[in-house]
Image: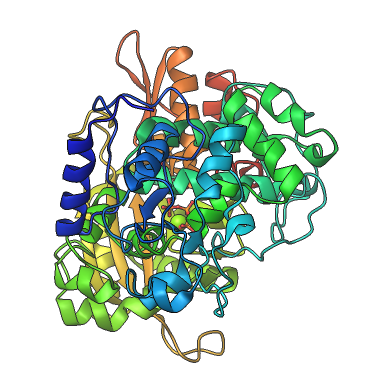
Amino acid sequence: MSGFDQKSIARGADAARRTGEVRVILSPEKGRRPGLRVLSQSTRVFVVEDKLVHPVREIQELVIKLGAQISGTSEAANVIVTSIRAPKRLLKHISREDSEDKYVVNPEWILDSAERAVMMDPDDYLAFKSSKEHVFHLPMKRGRTPDTEVESGMPGPSTSSASATRPPRPWRDTRYACERPSPLQCINQGLVDELEVIRRERELTGDEFSKMAYMRALSAIKAYPYDLSKNPSQASKLTGVGSKIGKLAEQYYEKGCIIEAKIIRRDKAIQTMIAFNELYGVGPTAARDAYNEGCRTLEDVIKKGKSLGTHLTRSESLRILPDLQSKIPRPEVEAIAHLISRMMEKIIPGCQHTICGGYRRGKPESSDVDIVYTHPDNRHNKAALHRLLDDLRREGIVTHIVSVTTPGLDEDSTNVHVDVAQIVVLPPISPLTPNPRHRRVDIIFCPFSVYGAAVLGWTGSHIFERDLRIFCRKEGYKFSFTGVTRLSDGKVLDTPTEREIFELFKLEWMPPEWRNCDA
Ligand code: TTP
Ligand code: MG
């Protein structure tokens, strides 16, 4: 049981003690994955030395050998290993909070995991019963009710289109998410939610490779319209699901959960980073950096100037934070779009618009409002959005303009002039919003010639968009919400409607309600 340098363990532990870092990577060769991954990489173990029968180094080495990490402090760990059976004695080594909130298990958890070559359920190895109910849970996906019973292939609760109730075509095992009808809630949603917990952890801890593997797998399962509980081994046969995630699917149907996801759900560090990540303007990397720099509350993050770009003052950010964190029900999305569109109509009559984003895909609640505008007469284009913002500000509807950009310089864009404004609005008092809240709104104004691309690009979901871009490259085009470029001659094609783009790419039409390829 060797190959691990004692000094590196001590160094990692010291570093963790100093920085309180979440991730302490202690593999023998930097960047190399352990050959045997029995425990998961998201598992960070702190070993309490007192009363241990085995030398602490041996236990630590075994933890690393099995693919998990050693934490130098109990604070940085999500599993605490101890032979102590008396809670009072344990409190000499770790805080009460850690003893109550984290998995505190006996060393047999590791030894049995090693012997059986599978991560054992820490709930079966608790050092003692905690008197406290565990309070940390990953927030469920926006607008989702936990454990909702769903009928196979029901796309979502709220769309008006008749196509919404039935998949547009029979299921086929295909590689690209944009070819697979994917409902808002699928028949195997419980499994998808568990895999999403792990995907999110990989995203927040910066493991891009593993994140992509979970993303592809959960997206393939999201589209699979048959009940996997009847045949769990079927999961690994789906394109995009490897044998490792296939095994996790089997574990899910055997045990009712994925053990790694269970540990992550109770991981306060991950919960905290998720909360940071949900702040406007804080990506997964910034969330991780903020945590590693010692931020523990949203206020800490805002004080560090990490949220909402640099456009709002600290006190402003804190004041409107609770509003921005709350989700927007569909009727309010519609009311906000109506309000803005009425003003747009006054500026340039004859404008067209589509409410895109999650709303268009049928989500019952959204975190923002995404509206794409156009006008058949191109003369109106350039000033339209700026005039709209002036009017909205004058009426007191816009409270903050976070950014106004004209994409075009980055390599993903065409040279087509498209304006994008990220704003915060405060709708007027009305029967629908007797206590109005600040809401985030993205407004896109594009030429009529690329309206289809803009609507398609802003409808999502993210995985749908990602695979759409890969799919269209295969067909000889580059897709962006600023237009479709033919790669052979660099020409930006006229795509005033979404359907033209599907036809161009030889892609079967996908109704928006069936583009929910993310968890
Ligand atoms: P979002 O508003 O970020 O996401 P959403 O509307 O799907 O969900 P919600 O607002 O409720 O959280 O973006 C809208 C769509 O635009 C998104 O589904 C896909 C597309 N999009 C990208 O493809 N890439 C991006 O970087 C962004 C910001 C959006
Ligand atoms: Mg949105």
Residue occupying the point 55% across, 59% down: 141
Q: Residue furthest top?
A: 488
Quarter of the image for residue 378 reads top left
Image region (quadrant) for ligand 2: bottom left
Q: Nearer the viewer, residue 217 or 107?
A: 107
Q: Give the total of numbered labels.
A: 0
Which x, y percent locates residue 468?
49, 28
Q: Nearer the viewer, residue 419 or 164?
A: 164
Residue 519 appears in the figure: no
Q: How is the image coloured?
A: rainbow
Residue 9 in the image: above or below residue 331? above
Residue occupying the point 36% across, 61% down: 50
Residue 365 appears in the figure: yes
Which x, y percent locates residue 497?
52, 36
In the shown orientation, is residue 346 left or right of residue 235?
Answer: left
Q: Nearer the viewer, residue 367 or 208?
A: 208
Which x, y percent locates residue 145?
66, 66
In the shown orientation, is residue 339 left or right of residue 284?
Answer: right
Residue 341 in the image: above or below residue 377? below
Which x, y percent locates residue 180?
65, 31
Quarter occupied by the N terminus: top left
Q: Nearer the viewer, residue 392 or 262?
A: 262
In the shown orientation, is residue 290 left or right of residue 118?
Answer: left
Quarter of the image for residue 287 reads bottom left
